[in-house]
Image: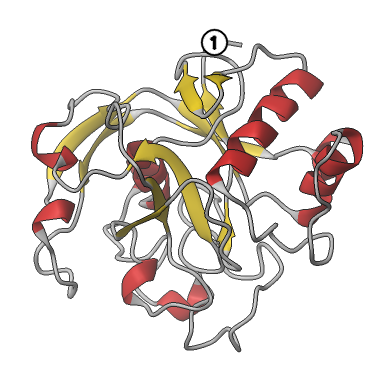
Amino acid sequence: MQARYYPDMVLVPGGTFEMGCKKGSGQECPDYERLHTVSLDSFWMARTETTVWQYFLYTKTSKGKKQPRGTGDEPVAFASWFDAVEYANWVSKQLGKEEAIDHKGEVYQVTLRSPGYRLPTEAEWEYAAKGGRQNQGFVYSGSKVLDSVGWYDGNSDLETHLIAKKDPNELGLYDMSGNLWEWCWDWSVKEYYRNSPRKNPPGPNSGTLRVLRGGSWGYSQKEASCFHRDKDIPSGRGQDYGFRLARAAGVE
């Protein structure tokens, strides 16, 4: 049951990395993607984007939740940020872990060192996409050639694809470049990189938009880079919006 209906988590050993866009990468490097050094504790990251199978079990056992579109091993799409965090708390409860996310109305707070499931921070997402300690400096997650690791507008036929049909990155994570945009925990604030904490940055305290990462089947190679930043309102449900879960390591 767990292998199919709950996330398969990969340990991402902590470390220090250069977050943001490196000049000479062949990509434009706007100031809001400026390079800066970040250190992270170890954490767990889902091997794939959350699938229709996984999300279906949640909707089937949760009152008032709409069943997902698509087939079992497709990543679940049309997911809002709110959908993602509510699903994360449900998984925590199903697996007997303390919930990492607390909310009153639309005010959400996360305990990053909780053993419960949650969305990755933007820093965790980029560190994992770049391969963590095994980072080889690729623009895309696992390769310098996007076609080998991701679905984008040049190879996708403009549709969602089954998970894990391209090569994984150095950590064994799939589809972090392309297929679906992935929600992160953080509010999106352009200037955050200028003065963000260098150790386990939790993201801005407030905002109106939440971070999306990784590009999708409907976007170009540029958006699929490990460092490209995008955003939307947390209630946004794009046809190419999905997510994967994370949780802290060493706090089980």
State how many labels appear: 1
Q: Is residue 109 left or right of residue 68?
A: left
Query: Residue 187's image quarter?
Result: top left
Q: Horizontal and vertical percent for residue 202?
A: 32, 26
Q: Extreme front residue here?
A: 105
Look at 37% across and 28% down and name the residue there.
14
Q: Horizontal and vertical percent for residue 3?
A: 81, 40
Viewer-closest of 147 and 62: 62
Look at 41% across and 44% down and name the residue there.
125
Q: Is residue 144 left or right of residue 80?
A: left
Vertical order, 114 against 168 (above or below): above
Q: Horizontal and vertical percent for residue 201?
A: 27, 28
Viewer-closest of 56 and 154: 56
Vertical order, 153 against 190 (above or below): below
Query: Residue 151's image quarter?
Result: bottom right
- Please, which colouring scheme is shown? secondary structure
| Residue type at the position of mark 1 | Val
Q: Residues within 10 Å of mark 1 (few under 14, many from 20)?
A: few
Q: Is residue 69 left or right of residue 99?
A: right
Look at 58% across and 84% down and name the residue there.
158
Task: Name the image quarter holding the N terminus.
Answer: top right
Viewer-closest of 61 and 27: 61
Mark 1, secondary structure of its residue? loop
Task: Name the image quarter holding the C terminus.
Answer: top right
Look at 43% across and 50% down and name the residue there.
233
Q: Which residue is mark 1?
A: 251
Q: Horizontal and vertical percent for residue 107?
A: 47, 24
